[in-house]
Image (cartoon, rainbow, N blue to C red):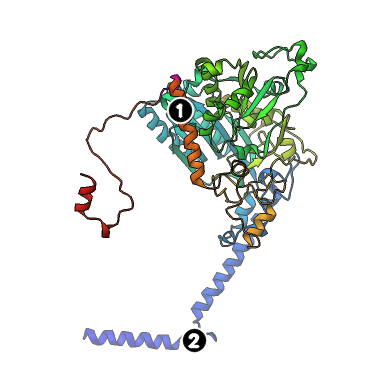
Amino acid sequence: KDHKGEKSKKKKKKEDRATVPESSTGETAATTEAKKTREENEKIMKRHQEEETKAILSSSTTAATPIPGRVAVSSAIEFYDPSVKTANSQQKKKVPPVLAARKYEHDLTLLLFYQYVEPVWDESTYEYMLSTLQKVGKDLELTGRMRVAREGLNCTLTGAHESILEYCNTLRRLRPEEFRNTEFKLTTDLPLAQKFPNLKVFKVVELVHYGLEGNKAPPISKYHGVHLEPEQYHKKLAEPNTVIIDVRNHYEAAIGRFVPPQEAASKNGNKDSNDTTDSPKATKDDSSQPPPKWLDPLMRKSTEFPPWLDKPETKEELKGKQVLMYCTGGIRCERATALLRYKMETDPEIKALGIKGVYQLQGGIDKYFKAFPDGGYWQGKNYVFDKRFAHAPPKIDGELHGRKERSGVAKEDSESDNAAATVSETTTKPPPVASVPVMGKCEACAKPWDMYRGKRRCPTCGVPSLICKECFIADRDGIKKLGREVRCDLCVEQGIKSKKELRKKDEKDIEEYEKRMSQKGLLTPNKADPPNPGGVTRLFLKNMCRKNMDETTLVQALP
């Protein structure tokens, strides 16, 4: 009986389907109605998106709509036009119009800071700071890079202005003794397009890899150079008998650097009465003293600095001079000046040079630009490790350094912000169009060029390649490919044609340097690793094939 009932139900359903009218395209009336409804909804959503986009474009700062007090076009955010983009970029998902408009809003704050800690954190404190900082960064929706070592922090972060300030406050609450005097450098009102995509926390041995970890590192608190504020450093750059050492990598110095005046300022008697630095006083025969000189250690990485400092030609340059050092944010100068001053006290050869003093730029080039928006003695662009890539001084580059007035946040509130973090602020009017002197040149055609774009690196040493727009397009279109012969100027100058040659050169330089230091009893090597408590021996056997290797052969090779 049940079986007959099921059959009758199926038959009835077929009859019902047969009576439903069909459209001319074979669709049912219900399907046609649903399709019409969906199309109407899509039209409504599209109209709302267009209205919202127009509202944003009319109220926000965009590259096409300048606002009083801001220069819309900036070489700091200059990219190739769409025709230069690779084929892979064309396959990416389309960005919604609303998000595409928002990325040009100047509502982003960049934070740069570092802090060395002495004595270094113990293992438990180190692990606590690692986990806590990562959690705080995620809770505040910050992005960027945190390098965390037992010797301190080195961070480059982006986020909302209030979140950045809260992060600075959190550090001071966590470790007040260590972060009370930390200089937090803020650059505000950057476009959202310069935001880091995510937050990365790196567990490292050294904040800057000099190869001076552990007992090899001279104490920074004891040996660091004299910190000079930008105004004091600016005056020192013009003094005679001075050597200015660029502690950055060569590819950074290739597009911009300090160019000291060749006529010493101290000759004209413009010594500042408030300058308390222990520099040599001006004398009557200042005219006979050599003008300030800029030195490039020609480094690809910071581990090359200690061997360079120990070279005979470097010692000759430093003889009887006062030494100035600078870098992007100041952190690389901490170890570099400490190493030189340590050797001045302990190494007889360096002590005999009669160096007059060792100074470093407080806050680095970043802070110098805030004090001298027109660039001062700087020429070219400053290479940076964030989404700005490189930028010229503010008046030339068109960037606005300082706090933007937000809804509900008045300018008078800046006092409370300064209590939370040291914020360098500069407000400038839109400068006239100015040209930036191009210091670098294309590695392929030698055309003047100073923009690092794309992902190409030197095939020999791996540093970023400086390739002009025309050569970039020619390589992309297959007209003229960039082969392995197109190398950085440093590899060409040194005649290095393979990674193996470079590795042997670096290993030889470091080995010879450490051998000389150990013979003098300087820079005690790190203590040996503790003995293996489990008595386990691990072997890594390379290039062994199962077909040609068995247990018998292995036992014979390793009795």
- Residue 49 in the image: above or below residue 40: above
> For the N terminus, which image quadrant?
bottom left
Magenta stretch bounds? 520-524
Q: Viewer-proximal residue, 499 or 187?
A: 499
> For the C terminus, which image quadrant?
top left
Q: Residue 433's x, y, as percent? A: 79, 42
Q: Earlier in the sequence, mark 1 or mark 2?
A: 2
Please give the residue where the numbered disc 2 appears in the rendered image. 21
Looking at numbered disc 1 in the image, what kind of residue is underneath it? Glu
Q: How many labels does the image show?
A: 2
Q: Which residue is drawn at 77% across and 38% down?
A: 430
Looking at numbered disc 2 in the image, what kind of residue is underneath it? Pro
- Residue 76 in the image: above or below residue 476: above
Q: Can residue 431 be seen in this view?
A: yes
Q: Residue 103's x, y, as percent? A: 62, 49
Q: Is residue 270 visible?
A: no
Q: Viewer-proximal residue, 309 or 91?
A: 309
Query: In screen coordinates, is 243 left or right of 211?
Result: right
Q: Residue 514 carries which label?
A: 1
Q: Distance between the residues labelled 1 and 2?
A: 91 Å
Q: Which residue is drawn at 76% across and 17% down?
A: 288
Helix, strand or loop status at disc 1: helix
Q: Residue 301's x, y, as percent? A: 53, 37
Circle 2 packing at 10 Å, graded few (<14), some (14-19), many (20+), is few
Helix, strand or loop status at disc 2: loop
Q: Residue at x 78, y 17 (%)?
A: 287
